[in-house]
Amino acid sequence: MNTSKQYQDYFTASTQPEIIEISRASYVSILGSGSPGTDAFYAKKKAIAAFAEALYSGSADIDNAIASNIVEIFYWFDEDKVGYVDIGNFYTTVDLALLQYRIAIGIPDFFTDEHIRQVAWQRKDLAFANAFEHFEYTAGKCVQILHSGPFAGELETLPILQEFATANGLKKSGMHQEIHLVSFERGQSQAHLQTILRDPVSEVSFF
């Protein structure tokens, strides 16, 4: 995510399922667990926006054209405990108390662990300051779709993405990712939301 074209493609999705290749990306992030609707979840979501703003404002090298305030969330379950959880039933087959997540905001590649630790040390007034960390991830081949409206509607959209993956001989192979293109706070209407639902995939082996 270090060129403008990559940046634009990363935050673009169709209302129809599609296959996309995502290269390595860097993030400032914070870990959490449990249902995404808890007080702790929303507190961390709010805090990361403030932390990213402090990170950007403290750098003389930042290019505003690639600065992001778009919140992304990576979700997964411990498969050793719950087994394999596919795309279409990701939120419906396992107790969400067992859900693990990483709330993230994409950052330019030149930011390092040291930059994040420095902001945490300088801005002790920021919530969860010492819990933020640098994260790099290469999603690779993914299936994705643009979901419009409330998050509850994802229970209907994800099976569509699952069917597409299966029809193309692909299976889920990593963390489920949600990219919140429209900013929102707890209690606000979700009717206007635009969310990219993205899952890394690999080819199904028949041997």
Image: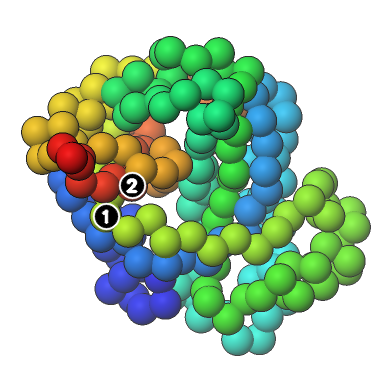
**Element type at marker 2?**
strand
Q: Quadrant of the C terminus?
A: top left
Classify mark 2: residues with Cα within 10 Å, few (<14), some (14-19) or many (20+): many
**Residue 182 appears anywhere in the view:** no
Residue 138 falls in image quadrant: bottom left
> Residue 170: x, y in percent?
19, 40
Q: Residue furthest left?
A: 167
If you read the primary sequence from the N terminus, does the residue marked by circle 1 or circle 2 appear first? 1
The picture quadrant where one finds residue 172 is top left
The Cα–Cα distance between marks 1 and 2, rounded to whole angstroms, is 6 Å
Name the residue rendered at 83%, 55% in the picture: 130
Q: Residue at x 33, y 47 (%)?
A: 200
Residue 200's tag is 2
Q: Residue furthest front?
A: 207
Q: Quadrant of residue 85?
A: top left
Q: Amino acid at mark 1?
A: Lys
The residue at 58%/37% (across/down) is: 101
The residue indicated by pointer 1 is 141
| Quadrant for the N terminus in the image | bottom left
**Residue type pointed to by label 2:** Pro
